[in-house]
Amino acid sequence: MNYSPYPAGQYYQSVPPTRKGRSPVDVVVTVLLFAVLVLAALASFYVSLYFAMATDGCYSDSDCNEDLLGPAYAFAWGGIFVGFVGAIVGTVVAACTRIWMWIWPLLGTIVIVVTFLIGLSFADAVVSR
């Protein structure tokens, strides 16, 4: 005899897999990293306001290259913009595609810190030593 797992020839339809919700750890870490991103952006902007003080030692007879202040501000402030936009767009795309979101504010913070350090090196190069 052949025993069927289905009674009287009835077949059961498979239940579609339930859609899992977003991990609470991912959401919490993303929010915390966005707070770190905002703090890094504020610190970068605030400290970059002092880049102009690099020209305090420049007089008419000194060897100062004041043209480097433009790129210093461009890197510092441009990095803030790129870091924020990249983090926001990346997080929205990650939320829609259901992949990790926390990586994007982390990458945005790294962009802000690195571009600030590049801008700082330009500001430091204003005064030749």
Image (tube, rainbow, N blue to C red):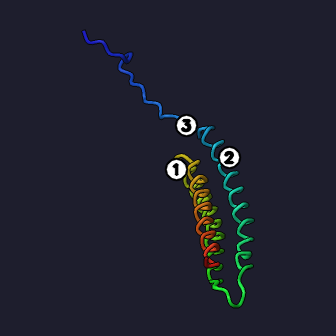
State the residue position of label 1: 97
Question: Dividing the picture into quarters, in which one does residue 11 lie?
Answer: top left
State the residue position of label 2: 32
- At label 1, the amino acid type is Thr
Figure check: 99 above or below 127? above
Task: Determine whether the residue tagged by mark 2 lies in a helix, strand or loop.
Answer: helix
State the residue position of label 3: 20
Checking the image for residue 122, the label placed there is none
For marks 3 and 2, the one nearer the N-term is 3
Mark 1 and mark 3: Cα distance apart in space: 13 Å
Figure check: 40 above or below 13? below
Q: Where is residue 82 shown, x and y percent of the image?
A: 60, 66
Between label 2 and label 1, give the one nearer the viewer.
2
Task: Determine whether the residue tagged by mark 1 lies in a helix, strand or loop.
Answer: helix
- At label 3, the amino acid type is Lys
Which residue is nearer to you in this view: 112 or 48? 48
**For this view, does 99 lie left or right of residue 8?**
right
Which residue is nearer to you in this view: 97 or 44? 44
Q: Where is residue 74 shown, x and y percent of the image?
A: 63, 75
Task: Determine whether the residue tagged by mark 3 lies in a helix, strand or loop.
Answer: loop
Identify the residue at image location x=39%, y=16%.
7
Q: How many marks?
A: 3
The crowd level at tag 2 (other Cα within 10 Å; few <14, some 14-19, many 20+) is some
Q: Where is residue 60 shown, x and y percent of the image?
A: 71, 90
Mark 3 and mark 2: Cα distance apart in space: 23 Å
For marks 2 and 1, the one nearer the N-term is 2
